[in-house]
Amino acid sequence: MQINRRAFLGTALAASAAAATRGFGACSCGAACSCSAGKSCGCVQRTQIGVQLYSIRGYIGGKKGVGLAKALKDVAAIGYKGVEFAGYYGNDAKTLKAMLGDAGLVACGTHVGRGEFSPEKIKATCEFNLAYGNNLIICPGGGNFPGKKQKLDDFLKMLVDYYNQAAETAATYGCKIGLHNHTREFELKMKDGTTYWDYFFSNTSKNVCMEQDVGWTTCAGADPCEQYRKYPGRSPTLHAKENGMGKGVKQFDAILGQPGKPGAVGVDWDKLFVATDKDGVKWYVVECERHCDDLSAIKPSFEFLKAKGRC
């Protein structure tokens, strides 16, 4: 995904559900409301489970693909309540909205290329997404890194200004934008030793969301939980992934709760749940980068999170 995402996104536009905010406040009593712990009905606010549709891109649009409409219904049948887009398979906003409604799903986000945040495109990006019920627009990986001849310090200062401006404009439409990480955000360091990640989130406004991929963060040797303590209240979603790591081991994208090869160290999910609940994360978005032609990875991943009380 670090390599292929940029090409996959292409000119894909952006979002996450304004309609999805209905799911953000689901309570343990089963009511769909906007209360949080100690308020309104007194129930404890719960997270919901969504899936990044990049996980089943072959199932949707491959040679034997079933198409987006059927794939959405199949995702809902597993138990997922939301989906995060990464491309729209040629569908317009009206069609997307109808497909989501027919499947009984909401959009909990979308992934786009950084160019969709440009001053020239941000208005159209927001309007497209609002038209199918989304308001959270995230940019992953590739386009957020400097070229070979660019100095990291200069690039990051530009990037921070770029995101701050886009977030300010998006807010006028009722949308939010944000950044999704892989490993390089923790590995690249500025001249003074500050990591890319820390500089970016220390200098962008709180309107710039942090969609942390906890699998990649763990793979980089960083603590996912610490990021919520350092940059609180900025994460409506996270990517739930298992990239096991260890000495001589780097198991890519195992099923949630199954780090993979012997010796692999996975995400400490129980510790993570405590941190994200405290921070107010609303959606655990499953991402599996293998088995994109079927549902064999996203089914057990959903069941793992369900068993852990994430829905």
Image: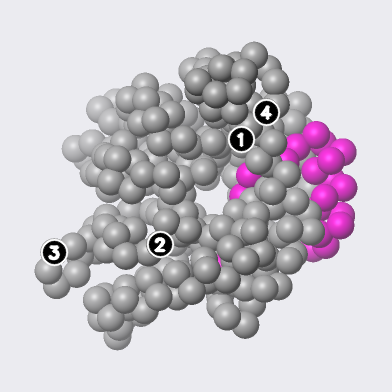
In 3D space, how far apart are the residues under numbered discs 2 and 3 (Cα atoms)? Answer: 22 Å
Circles 2 and 1 in contact, beta carbons < 8 Å: no
Vertical order, 156 against 232 (above or below) = below
- Residue 185 in percent (x, y) is at 31, 59
Categorize mark 1 by other alpha carbons within 10 Å: few (<14), some (14-19), many (20+): many
Left or right position of 6 against 14: left
Q: Earlier in the sequence, mark 2 or mark 4?
A: 4
Quarter of the rendering containing residue 254: top left
Q: Which residues are magenta?
A: 90-113
Q: Amino acid at mark 2?
A: Ser
- Residue 4 in percent (x, y) is at 52, 61
Q: Earlier in the sequence, mark 1 or mark 4?
A: 1
Residue under label 4:
33
In 3D space, how far apart are the residues under numbered discs 1 and 3 (Cα atoms)? Answer: 37 Å
Q: Which residue is found at the position 69% from the left and 52% from the top? A: 134
In this rendered view, identify the residue nearer to me: 59 or 221: 221
Residue 205's label in the rendered image is: 2
Tag 3 secondary structure: loop
Considering the image in quadrants, where does the C terminus appear? top right
Vertical order, 72 against 166 (above or below) = above
Q: Amino acid at mark 4?
A: Cys
